[in-house]
Image (cartoon, coloured by chain):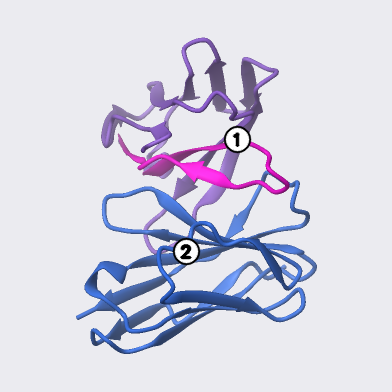
Chain colours: A blue, B purple
Amino acid sequence: GAGVSQSPSNKVTEKGKDVELRCDPISGHTALYWYRQRLGQGLEFLIYFQGNSAPDKSGLPSDRFSAERTGESVSTLTIQRTQQEDSAVYLCASSPIPQGYEQYFGPGTRLTVT
Amino acid sequence: DQQVKQNSPSLSVQEGRISILNCDYTNSMFDYFLWYKKYPAEGPTFLISISSIKDKNEDGRFTVFLNKSAKHLSLHIVPSQPGDSAVYFCAASAYTGFQKLVFGTGTRLLVSP
């Protein structure tokens, strides 16, 4: 079946512009996670959705970052007034239940802020 | 504060030999540990996991060992194959209503023919 998909695969933007990153989880997966991976770093947790509510936003690095999820499907991560330090690969993952340990990852969106 | 550490950024092994990837953690609340494998331009894929109530879990060529007293886990790949060449991430979780994974920085494994 279809895995987690993300779009765009690559995004280059100028500093100060807003960007939207999209994630389509595996159908039926209620839990959705956003992570980012900066160069040379591990994956860094950003936010978790159960259904369309976000019980844990603790990983969002600043108020320029926000995320939404429609029902138990598509999620968008929005970064306002992008900065160069936002350059990273943004990864989305989903799992069937929040208690599930195995998370299925998408291929990521590589964001470059110039 | 790096709660999960992979101190070896890279490892080179010959085909057929054993690959041993190491991971250390600091948070004693972690109760589940996972290894993910990542190829370039792809998302990480789940490889193998272990609960804190066990000290070993095996799946084919892959075995994960957990030493809770040392807060250390390792992934053994035997025999190593060129297709195993990838970046391997160790991840840990402490259940807080959902599985928030904390990842290490990864070890790049190169298996040469």
Q: Please provide percent x and percent y for residue B107.
A: 34, 38
Residue B87 lies in magenta, yes or no?
yes
Q: Please provide percent x and percent y for residue B46.
A: 58, 46
Residue B30 picture quarter: top right
Looking at the image, how many numbered discs can be counted on the residues?
2
- For the residue pair B55 and B20, the one nearer the viewer reads as B55
Identify the residue under disc 2.
Answer: A60
Secondary-structure class at tag 1: strand
Asked if both marks, 2 and 1, belong to the same chain, the answer given is no
In magenta, the rendered stretch is B86-111
Q: Residue furthest left?
A: A114
Q: Identify the residue shown where x is 36% and y is 38%.
A: B1
Most common SS among magenta residues: strand
- For the residue pair B80 and B92, the one nearer the viewer reads as B92
Count residues near mark 1 (Cα–Cα under 10 Å), then give few for <14, some for 14-19, many for 20+: some
Count residues near mark 2 (Cα–Cα under 10 Å), then give few for <14, some for 14-19, many for 20+: some
Q: Give the mark toward the camera: 2 or 1.
A: 2
Q: Identify the residue shown where x is 29% and y is 83%.
A: A12
On the question of residue B37 being in view, the answer is: yes
Q: How far is mark 2 from mark 1, CA to CA?
A: 28 Å
Q: Residue furthest top?
A: B69
Residue B16 lies in magenta, yes or no?
no
Secondary-structure class at tag 2: loop
Residue B18 picture quarter: top left
Q: Is residue B59 left or right of residue B72?
A: right
Identify the residue under disc 1.
Answer: B48
Q: Amino acid at mark 1?
A: Ile
